[in-house]
Image (cartoon, helix red, strand yellow):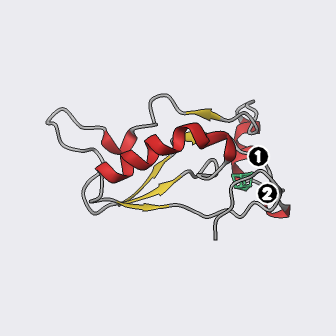
């Protein structure tokens, strides 16, 4: 099974590819502003959540898509990223898949 983990939400457009951003579209449909970047309340530690029997809700071996409504390396998320890495370290039995976004303007995180 595939799952989604959004530790933060909202993003800053950085290229032509962002023109038709699906997250911005969905936020607009909900009367929200996709450029408002915030840490998700209930979802931040989602991979560590357990059911009533004390078992992880996200099962061992599952794949989780990370940051599907933002950019994991977004500068505005710098303060939250270490904690997100520690969540992933705690769940080494889960596969975390994160899209890499290349930001070309100065001051933004870059990944290759
Ligand atoms: S979520 Fe992706 S497509 Fe949307 S603005 Fe951010 S980088 Fe661009």
Q: Is residue 41 above or below residue 102?
A: above
**Which quadrant holds residue 95?**
bottom left
Q: Nearer the viewer, residue 57 or 93?
A: 93
Q: From the image, tell me which residue sits under label 1.
A: 12
Residue at the extreme front: 107
Q: Residue at x 16, y 37 (%)?
A: 54
- Total marks drawn? 2
Q: Residue at 64% of width from left, 65% of height from top?
A: 111
Residue 85 position, x and y percent, is: 43, 49
Q: Residue at x 76, y 33 (%)?
A: 33
SS at badge 1: loop
Decide: few, some or many residues near mark 1? Use Cα within 10 Å; few <14, some 14-19, many ≥20.
some
Sequence-wise, the earlier of marks 2 and 1 is 1
Q: Assess mark 2: CB under 8 A from ligand 1?
A: yes
User: Can you tell which of label 2 and label 1 is closer to the viewer?
Assistant: 1
Q: Which residue is located at x 62 percent, y 53 percent?
A: 73
Residue 28 position in % (x across, y down): 77, 37
Residue 102, position in %: x, y?
71, 64
Q: Is mark 1 within 8 Å of ligand 1?
A: yes
Where residue 65 is drawn, which disc sits there? none
Q: Which residue is mark 2?
A: 18
Q: Quadrant of residue 110?
A: bottom right
Element at badge 2?
A: helix
**With 40 as the anchor, is 109 left or right in this view?**
right
Q: Where 30 sits versus 106, above or below?
A: above
**Quick one: which residue is furthest to the left in this view?**
53
């Amino acid at each position: 099974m595939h799952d989604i983990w959004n530790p933060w939400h909202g993003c800053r457009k950085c290229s032509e590819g962002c023109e038709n951003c699906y997250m911005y579209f969905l936020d607009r449909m909900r009367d929200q502003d996709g450029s408002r970047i915030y840490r998700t309340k209930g979802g931040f530690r989602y991979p560590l959540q357990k059911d009533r029997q004390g078992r992880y809700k996200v099962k061992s071996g599952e794949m989780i898509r990370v940051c599907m409504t933002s950019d994991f390396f977004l500068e505005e998320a710098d303060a939250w990223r270490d904690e997100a890495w520690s969540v992933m370290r705690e769940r080494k039995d889960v596969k975390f898949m994160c899209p890499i976004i290349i930001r070309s303007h100065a001051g933004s995180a870059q990944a290759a």
